[in-house]
Image (cartoon, rainbow, N blue to C red):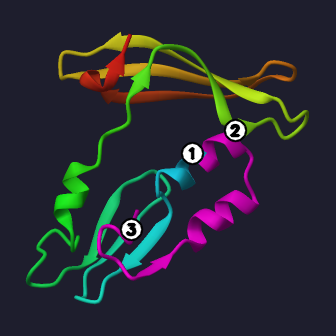
C-alpha cells in the first residue's frame, strides 16, 4: 500500500512490536492490515508516520507534495472501509485455540446528526466464544444494512 503511494523506505517496527505482545490478536492483525503503526519515507523527502490508531502525522514534506504523500491521487482513490451490518464468517482469520474460522458481527448502536454512526463490532469463535469487542464511529455512508 505504501509503495503504491510512492514511499520507498517503510518501517513497520511499531506494529510488529504490537503483534508480538498482543493481548487482542484479531484487533491488532486488523490494524496491521489497515497499515497502522508504520513510518514511511519517499525519495522526494516526504516522511509520514501512521500511529497504531490510524492517525497520520506528516513529519516532513517536499515542495511538490504539500500533504506529505507523493502519489496523493492514489490516496484519494482508496476506498474507505464498508461496514456490513450482521454476521459474517471471516475466511482469513482463525481462532488461535481451536483453528476455527472466526465470525464477525456488526450492529448499529446509534446514528448521529453529524453524519457519523456508532457501531458495535464483535469477533467470536463458534467454539471458544467471544474474543473481542470494539465500538467504532464511522461515516454513515460507509454502513450497509
Label 2 crowding class (10 Å Cα cut-off): few <14, some 14-19, many 20+?
some
Task: Say if the magenta span includes residue 24.
Answer: yes
Report the span colored magenta: 1-29
Q: Quadrant of residue 73?
A: bottom left
* Residue 30 circle label: 1
Residue 68 is one of the magenta-drawn residues: no
Q: Which mark is drawn over residue 93?
A: 2
The foreground one among 115 and 143 is 143
Residue 59 lies, with reference to residue 84, above or below; the image says below
Q: Residue at x 22, y 50 (%)?
A: 77
| First along the sequence among labels 3 and 2 | 3
In the picture, the quarter occupied by the N terminus is bottom left
Image position, residue 144 (x, y; %): 36, 16
Element carrying mark 3? loop
Give the position of the C terminus as an image quadrant.
Answer: top left
Badges 3 and 1: C-beta atoms under 8 Å apart? no
Q: CA distance from mark 1 to mark 2?
A: 10 Å
Along the line of sight, the residue nearer the viewer: 144 or 48: 144
Mark 1, mark 2: which one is toward the viewer?
Answer: 2
15 vs 61: above or below:
above
Which residue is disc 3 drawn over? Answer: 2
Residue visible at 13% across and 75% down in the picture: 65
Element on which disc 2 rests: strand
Image location (x, y in percent) of residue 48? 33, 72
Judged from the image, the secondary structure of the residue bearing numbered disc 1 is helix
Q: CA distance from mark 3 to mark 2?
A: 23 Å
Amino acid at each position: 500500500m505504501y509503495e503504491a503511494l510512492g514511499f520507498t523506505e517503510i518501517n513497520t517496527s511499531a506494529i510488529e512490536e504490537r503483534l508480538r505482545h498482543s493481548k487482542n490478536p484479531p484487533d491488532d492483525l486488523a490494524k496491521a492490515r489497515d497499515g497502522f503503526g508504520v513510518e514511511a519515507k519517499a525519495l522526494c523527502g516526504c516522511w509520514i508516520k501512521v500511529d497504531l490508531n490510524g492517525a497520520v502525522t506528516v513529519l516532513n514534506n517536499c515542495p511538490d507534495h504539500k500533504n506529505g504523500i507523493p502519489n496523493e491521487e492514489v490516496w484519494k482513490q482508496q476506498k474507505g472501509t464498508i461496514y456490513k451490518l450482521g454476521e459474517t464468517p471471516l475466511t482469513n482469520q482463525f481462532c488461535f485455540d481451536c483453528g476455527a474460522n472466526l465470525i464477525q458481527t456488526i450492529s448499529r448502536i446509534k446514528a448521529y446528526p453529524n453524519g457519523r454512526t456508532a457501531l458495535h463490532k464483535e469477533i467470536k469463535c463458534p467454539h471458544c466464544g467471544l474474543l473481542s469487542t470494539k465500538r467504532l464511529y464511522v461515516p454513515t455512508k460507509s454502513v450497509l444494512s
